[in-house]
């Protein structure tokens, strides 16, 4: 390059680089509707179990399974049809955030269910999954924002 | 710390946009790159061919069902060149106010 490149041009180039990398990260973000869908499916499954008839379980399990697989397929479609994120973007802290979120939802839901059952309340699994589903709907987007921040921090040029 | 090296091949805005997208990806679909950067098929093909000649990019052609699909990824050499270029840009910004003549 023969012409002089000033710091302002370099800053503009760096901003463009960041914007492009954000595009890749954003297309891989799990949408908000996914978390609420999974939460609702959890409630359906728990209700089927709480009713305790073979018909209710027989209906709830397929709805949960098909619903979860379909929702997941739609939510991650971009990862397979557009661009797959580079592995290095999500480091140990990202994995810890995901595992912590799962542990919180599963542990919290089970804890509430056992506590309600011990207290003799009807439909303990359903009520617990309702709480877990709401936590998932509210917490899922927070997890996504956390992972996005981690990935943006790990992209090229963010650590110098 | 990554060594700083300004890369004339990567720096033009269109190629910088393409390489930046690829730097965050394991691989990216041709259509995704085209739509993200706002290029025609032929213009993107030309830019990718230039990057491929420099061995910065690897082009992969395959089929999904009966549909042809082209995807691209940065090679290790391309990733290194990109990181060095980003480091060079950051050095320029760090010396704010100073005119820099890249090699």
Image: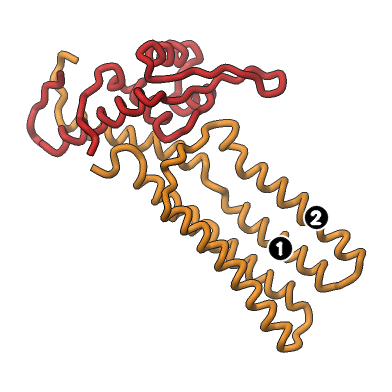
Quadrant position of residue B21? top left
Mark 2 / mark 1, whichever is N-terminal: 1
Report the chain holding disc 1.
A
Q: Is residue A30 left or right of residue B20?
A: right
Colour in which chain B is drawn? red
Q: Which mark is residue B33?
A: none
Q: Residue at x 21, y 26 (%)?
A: B5
**Residue hosting label 1:** A42
Report the chain holding disc 2.
A
How many marks are shown on the rendered structure? 2
Q: Residue at x 59, y 61 (%)?
A: A137
**Residue hosting label 2:** A63
Q: Residue at x 55, y 68 (%)?
A: A104
Crowd rating for badge 2 (residues with CA inside 10 Å; few <14, some 14–19, many 20+): some
* x and y, in percent, of residue A103 in the image: 56, 65
**Can you name the residue that lies furthest to the left here?**
B98
Q: Is residue A118 above or below residue B6?
A: below
Quadrant position of residue A15? top left
Colour in which chain A is drawn? orange
Q: Is residue B17 left or right of residue A123?
A: left
């Amino acid at each position: 390059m023969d012409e002089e490149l000033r710091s302002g041009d370099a800053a503009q180039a760096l901003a463009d680089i960041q914007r492009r990398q954000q595009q890749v990260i954003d297309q891989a973000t799990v949408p908000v509707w996914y978390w609420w869908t999974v939460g609702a499916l959890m409630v359906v499954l728990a209700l089927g179990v709480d009713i305790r008839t073979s018909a209710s379980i027989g209906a709830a399990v397929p709805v949960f399974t098909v619903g979860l697989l379909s929702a997941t397929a739609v939510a991650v479609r971009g990862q397979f049809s557009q661009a797959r994120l580079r592995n290095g973007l999500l480091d140990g802290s990202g994995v810890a955030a995901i595992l912590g979120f799962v542990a919180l939802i599963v542990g919290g839901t089970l804890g509430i269910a056992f506590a309600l059952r011990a207290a003799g309340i009807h439909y303990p699994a359903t009520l617990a999954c309702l709480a877990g589903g709401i936590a998932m709907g509210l917490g899922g987007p927070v997890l996504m924002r956390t992972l996005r921040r981690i990935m943006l921090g790990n992209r090229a040029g963010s650590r110098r | 710390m990554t060594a700083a090296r300004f890369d004339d091949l990567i720096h033009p805005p269109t190629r910088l946009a393409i390489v930046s997208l690829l730097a965050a990806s394991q691989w990216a679909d041709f259509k995704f790159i085209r739509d993200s950067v706002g290029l025609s098929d032929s213009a993107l093909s030309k830019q990718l061919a230039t990057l491929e000649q420099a061995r910065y990019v690897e082009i992969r052609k395959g089929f999904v069902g009966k549909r042809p699909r082209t995807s691209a990824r940065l090679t290790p050499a391309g990733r290194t060149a990109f990181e060095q270029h980003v480091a060079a840009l950051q050095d320029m910004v760090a010396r704010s106010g100073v005119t820099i003549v890249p090699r």
